[in-house]
Image (cartoon, grey):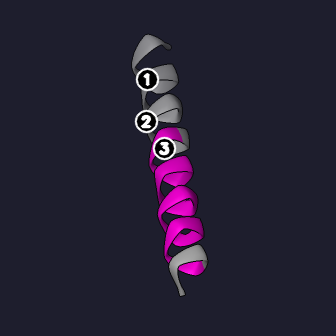
Amino acid sequence: MAIFGNREFTNSMLLYCFLRYVTVIGLHH
């Protein structure tokens, strides 16, 4: 359960970082 939770957390962070990156690129262009 802890491993699954950690995986969920990691996926959420990756998604957040991805959206953050896209937003920054969008603002610069």
The label on residue 6 is 1
Q: Cα distance, mark 2 to mark 1?
A: 6 Å
Which residue is nearer to you in this view: 5 or 21?
21
The label on residue 11 is 3
Q: Is residue 24 above or below residue 8?
A: below
Residues rendered magenta in the picture: 13-26
Residue ID at (43%, 36%): 10
Is residue 14 highlighted in magenta? yes
Residue ID at (47%, 51%): 17
The residue at the far bottom in this view is 29
Three-letter code for the amino acid on which mark 3 is drawn:
Asn
Q: Cα distance, mark 2 to mark 3?
A: 4 Å
Three-letter code for the amino acid on which mark 1 is drawn:
Asn
> Residue 27: percent from the left, percent from the top?
60, 75
Q: Cα distance, mark 3 to mark 1?
A: 9 Å
Which residue is nearer to you in this view: 21 or 29?
29
> Residue 1: percent from the left, percent from the top?
50, 14
Which residue is nearer to you in this view: 28 or 11?
28
**Badge 3: how crowded within 10 Å, few (<14), some, or many (20+)?**
few
Is residue 15 highlighted in magenta? yes
Q: Is residue 2 above or below residue 29?
A: above
Give the quadrant of residue 19: bottom right
| Cβ–Cβ under 8 Å for marks 2 and 3 | yes
Which residue is nearer to you in this view: 16 or 11?
16
Left or right: 23, with 4 as reference point: right
The label on residue 10 is 2
Q: Main secondary structure of the magenta part?
A: helix
| Secondary-structure class at tag 2 | helix
> Residue 4: percent from the left, percent from the top?
47, 25
